[in-house]
Image (spheres, coloured by chain):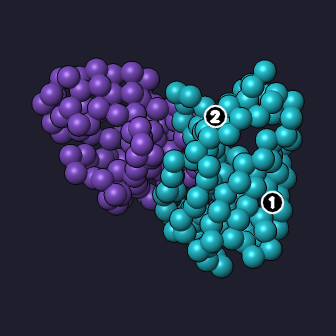
Chain colours: A cyan, B purple
Amino acid sequence: DAKTTQPPSMDCAEGRAANLPCNHSTISGNEYVYWYRQIHSQGPQYIIHGLKNNETNEMASLIITEDRKSSTLILPHATLRDTAVYYCIVSPYTGRRALTFGSGTRLQVQP
Amino acid sequence: DVKVTQSSRYLVKRTGEKVFLECVQDMDHENMFWYRQDPGLGLRLIYFSYDVKMKEKGDIPEGYSVSREKKERFSLILESASTNQTSMYLCASISLAGGPWEQFFGPGTRLTVL
C-alpha cells in the first residue's frame, strides 16, 4: 500500500471548517483513499473514501487532486465531538485485506 | 444499527494465563480482523479470517491464535499471556459485497497482563 503523510496535529475552532491534508505521492492507479477517525477510547470509524472524483457524504467531503498525489478531508462545521485522530489510508479495495493505519492527525476542536 | 461487539471493554490477566477475546458481528460479513493498537505504533494486524474455519496471519501473529467456528464470531486467543501483550485489541469486519467498503470496528478491549 502507498505511504501517506499527515500532520501530527491540528486545531480548529468550533463551527468552522476543518481541512485535514494528506499526501500520498506514490499512490497507484487501483488504490483508493480512505479516511477513518478514532475518538478517544473507541474503535476507528469510517468516514469516506474516493478514487479519483471528489466525494461528499453526511459526515464530510473528500477532495482529491487531479494527479491523486494528495487529498483533503473537509469537515464543514466542526463540533467538539469531532475531536479525534483522523487517519488517511491508501489501499486497493479492502474487502480481502486489512487496512494499514499510520499515526494520523490529532484534530482538536476548540470551543 | 450495524454492530461489532467485543466481549469485554477492560480485562486484567496474569502472566501465563490463557486469554480469550471474543468478537461478534451482526452484519453477516465474510471478513473479520483482529488488530492491536499501541501508542506510537498505530494499529497492527494480528490475524484475519475470510470465511468460517479460514484464517490468515497478519503482521504480528506470534503469541496469538484465532478461531472462527461461526460466521458471526471471531475469537482471539492468547495461549500464555505475557506482559508485552498488554494492549488495546480491536476487532473489525467487512462485507465482500459492493460498496461502501468500510470496515466496522468494535469498541475495543483494553487488556492488561500483570
Label 2 SS? strand
| Place of residue A26 in the rendered image (x, y in percent of width and height, measured from the top left) | 59, 74
Q: Residue at x 40, y 52 (%)?
A: B45
Label 1 is placed on what type of residue?
Answer: Ile
| Place of residue A39 in the rendered image (x, y in percent of width and height, measured from the top left) | 60, 32
Q: Chain of mark 1?
A: A
Which residue sits furthest bottom? A29
Q: Residue at x 63, y 34 (%)?
A: A84
Provide the residue designation for mark 2.
A84
- Foreground pick, B20 / A58: A58
Q: Residue at x 58, y 65 (%)?
A: A91
Q: Is any part of residue A35 visible from this angle?
A: yes
Q: Quick check: A96 left or right of B80?
A: right
Whether B22 is drawn above or below A61: the answer is above
Q: Chain of mark 2?
A: A
- Residue B34's label in the rendered image is none
- Foreground pick, B76 / A37: A37
Question: Alpha carbon of mark 2 to alpha carbon of mark 1: how far?
Answer: 20 Å
Label 1 SS? strand
Q: Which corner quadrant holds the C terminus of chain A? A: top right
- Foreground pick, A17 / A42: A17
Q: Earlier in the sequence, mark 2 or mark 1?
A: 1
- Residue A63's label in the rendered image is 1
Q: Residue at x 75, y 55 (%)?
A: A72
Q: Quick check: A86 left or right of A101?
A: right
Label 2 is placed on what type of residue?
Answer: Ala
Q: Quadrant of residue A93?
A: bottom right
| Place of residue A25 in the rendered image (x, y in percent of width and height, measured from the top left) | 63, 71
